Amino acid sequence: MNGTVYLLDIDGTLVDSNYHHVVAWRRAFQRHELNVPAWRIHKVMGMGGDQLIAELAGDQVEREHGDSIREAWQQEFEPNLQYIEPFDGAHRLLADIVAAGGTVVLASSSKPHHAKHYVDLLDARDLATAWTDSGDVSDTKPSPELLHEGLSRVDGKRAVVIGDAVWDGVAARRAGLPFVGVLGGGYTDAELREAGAGQVYDGTEALRNDLADLPTAPINS
């Protein structure tokens, strides 16, 4: 495990936030008289807000209303931060990785202040060697840019991506890295495996027991 970089998503993987995001996006679209069903919004959780609107409502809506919808989403989501909690075992997972000689990188599509809030919520400032957020890249997941940025900030020989969403899997594949799924964000085992997950775990606590057996791949310099 020494020399392995663990690129972990945050929303839906380490903190229980996905459904708060769904409700906030639903209300943001409604403010603009756009009826986007909650189930469709859920299917793009894990995709960054820079790409989510076009995916759900089309390029024209993104061009004409994208920034105002994102602003409305932030207004709707911000009050929910107080209700978001880490998943059981999330802090212990990060601590176990570090104790075993691995490197923790938190790779999130979150807004910068949300990512910092989650790092503190997880008590992870002394555990995460680096973290990335939407402010660090031009394109969020499913682009691999967040993963590449995270890897550029640490030393390591091999890496693995851990996340709850199919978009984590897409980003991992594009980065040439293996993907391990966690059932924390509402995606099914089958959906995560179809997105490339060789292994899927029922939460962070279950994942802790298999750290030494996770697939890794060399980091391309």
Image (cartoon, rainbow, N blue to C red):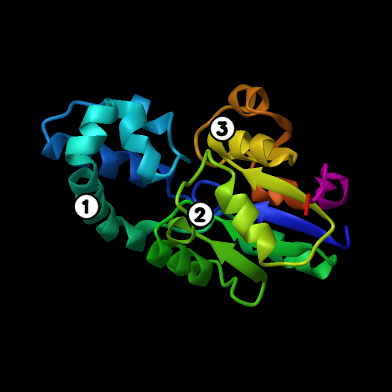
Amino acid type at mark 1: Glu
Amino acid type at mark 2: Val
- Tell me if mark 1 has few (under 14), some (14-19) or many (20+) residues whose alpha carbon lies within 10 angstroms of its own: few
Depth check, front residue: 36 or 50: 50
Q: Quadrant of the C terminus?
A: bottom right
- Tell me if mark 2 has few (under 14), some (14-19) or many (20+) residues whose alpha carbon lies within 10 angstroms of its own: many
At horizontal 35% and vertical 45% (from top left) the residue drawn is 21
At horizontal 62% and vertical 51% (from top left) the residue drawn is 147
> Residue 122's spot in the image, x, y percent?
55, 66
* Bounds of the magenta segment: 210-219
Residue at numbered disc 3:
166
- Residue occupying the far front of the picture: 221
- First in sequence: mark 3 vs mark 2: 2
- Residue occupying the far bottom of the picture: 126
Residue at numbered disc 1:
71
Amino acid type at mark 3: Val
- First in sequence: mark 1 vs mark 3: 1
The kind of secondary structure element at disc 2 is loop
